Image: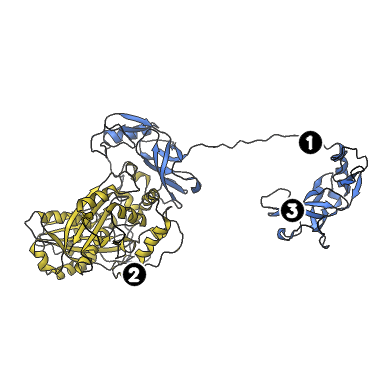
Chain colours: A yellow, B blue
Amino acid sequence: MRDVAIVAFAQTRHTGHDTGLTEPELIGPVIGEVKERTGLKRFGFTCSGSCDYLAGAPFSFVSALDALAAWPPISESHVEMDGAWALYEAWVRLQHGDIDSALVYGFGKSSLGDLRTIMTLQLDPYYLAPLGLDQLSYAALQANAAGADRAELDQIVRRSRADGRRNPYALDLPDPEGEDVAVRPLKATDVPPITDGAAAIVLAAGDLASRLCPRPAYIRGIAHRTEPHYLGMRDLARSDSAADAARAAGVGKGPVEVAELHAQFPHEEIILREALGLRDDTEINPSGGPLAANPVMATGLIRIGEAARRVHDGAARRTVGHATSGPCLQQNLVTVLEA
Amino acid sequence: MPSDPLVAQHVLEFPGGYTRTTGPVIGRFLSELRGRRIVGVRTKEGKVLVPPLEYDPATGEPVTGEFVEVGPAGTVTTWAFVPEPGAGHPLDRPFAWALIKLDGADTALVHAVDAGDPKRLRAGMRVWPVWNDHPTGQITDISCFVPEVTDIVANVRTEYRLQAGGALRVFLEGIERGVFLGGRCDTCAKVYVPYRLTCPECGNAIPETLELPDTGTITTFAINNLPDPRAPEVPFVSAYILLDGSDIPVIALIGDVPAHEVRQGMRVRAVWVPEPERTASMANIRWFAPTGEPDVEQP
């Protein structure tokens, strides 16, 4: 495998409301930031992750290219998934060996519609979507199957929000209070905030990585796995696909100092910690994680960016970034980053 | 529409919806649903997938062509309760989502459960489908599932004609005049009220009635929180009252005093309905009310 590293990461100051910026206007500054930090104006490959249903505009990802300077024509691709999967595609593209750099970005404005029911549209159209099964409902089914301790769940939310308040890019959310029910057993405070935001990452291969960044975060392992979509055909109390991806990425080959997990609900963090085999001394989501800022379609990419940032600034030598997609942690991507 | 002129409503809609082909496996399942049957498909390893898929998710192998009728009842494996249903939800009242392992299936079906009180929900709960009146071949041909019948309500009502004869007639005729009639057993030296023909202790006859006053002392009482047609309000107090000069208390309502002020030893007097309204009935006495005298030491 070719050595590929994350050499730059930028994200917006995420907002809990619609600021009225268009998607290209949202993306533009973070693209500018990673270009400036790496000094690169053009990239061997560009790949993005987003979901047109968030804005309700078919092919909205195409107009997002206006933020890139895409003329003369660039080599570009898009995944209708979180930007973390765009990063995976870019990593695979860099393995071809003919290019040395890639730009990856993800973005989403979940403030524009009703995210809970928009997420119903990702479900199987025969058996699940016609029931109107929404995001909070299927998450609550998994929370009940996992049967986590309420005090532990509350503590995860409290820690995430406190960390988020220290993170200038995340939302300022108060300590969780109240017993309001969202969908039982989920409490209102278990639900991640509606968030608009974007993030960008630059990957570089070979010698270019160390020329662009004093401490590149090398991708030492990256893998994604999926399991059956239908909720009744898998054990919701665990995540076999996250465990498989973690094994394939080599998470257990060394100590993990920091893990950034794409856990949108507190019970998901418990399931993922178990699946990834993380020990108690691994710091989880020091950024605050998705419970402090959840710009859908960028949240997973931000986990990888935050994990890389710990390596870039010398805080850690070995970190893990995780991203998920689909209902109830259906698909999981795990990457191991090292100095 | 929003009032800010720079905010617009935007709707994404596909008029008429997408047409999707079902393929043979899902199509068979939906056709069976239209016929109010639930079928699964058998995998090469012998498992029954419900709802059926074309490929076994565990192995990736194509499933066999064998369809197996399952259910219609099943067992809830996990659930989530929706206290405030949304517009797209299958029920307009609080309901639960559940994974339901139908009898004979090896996988669980996702559907709604109309269980009413969320306290009834638990893993292991047995549920049965409620069918849509006009099945058309969609997963919503099952409107929802409901809990298995585990109990019924058996109503009992029979009517009788009761006649007061003997000692009761004598007593009620006294009540009509505004008097409590009792009787003394000469052998046991006890005064019973209401009047009775024989002493319950020794069995001797009690030939004479004895007029008793309508004042007495509360010996014990209960605060009742369930409505009763005879009581003026809820909560109300029912009490044992030892009428002055008697040895056996009578039971009656206590009124004209807040429930929390009623106490043992309290002195009370019967409150009678006005004389023109009186009949030979205990309804002559509204209740007993405090006299205001000092409390009496308990015997």
> Horizontal and vertical percent for residue B203?
87, 37
Foreground disc of the pair 2, 1: 2
Label 1 close to label 3 by CB (< 8 Å): no
Read off the residue under disc 3: B221
The verdict on a common chain for dots 2 and 3 is no
What's the CA distance linking mark 2 and mark 3? Answer: 60 Å
Q: Secondary structure at mark 1?
A: loop
What's the CA distance linking mark 2 and mark 1? Answer: 78 Å
> Horizontal and vertical percent for residue B97?
41, 46
Q: Is residue A111 visible?
A: no
What's the CA distance linking mark 1 and mark 3? Answer: 29 Å
Look at the image and tell me in which quarter the C terminus of chain A lies: bottom left
Read off the residue under disc 1: B162
Look at the image and tell me in which quarter the N terminus of chain A lies: bottom left
Amino acid tagged 3: Phe
**Which one is nearer the viewer's eye here, B197 or B91?**
B197
> Horizontal and vertical percent for residue A267?
36, 55
Residue beneath the point at 46% across and 52% down: B83
**Which one is nearer the viewer's eye here, A320 or B140?**
A320
Label 2 close to label 3 by CB (< 8 Å): no
Q: Is residue A254 left or right of residue A181?
A: left
Label placed on residue A165: 2
Amino acid tagged 1: Leu
**Which one is nearer the viewer's eye here, A297 or A3?**
A3
Q: Is residue A253 left or right of residue B222?
A: left
The verdict on a common chain for dots 2 and 1 is no
Tag 1 subunit: B
Q: Secondary structure at mark 3?
A: strand
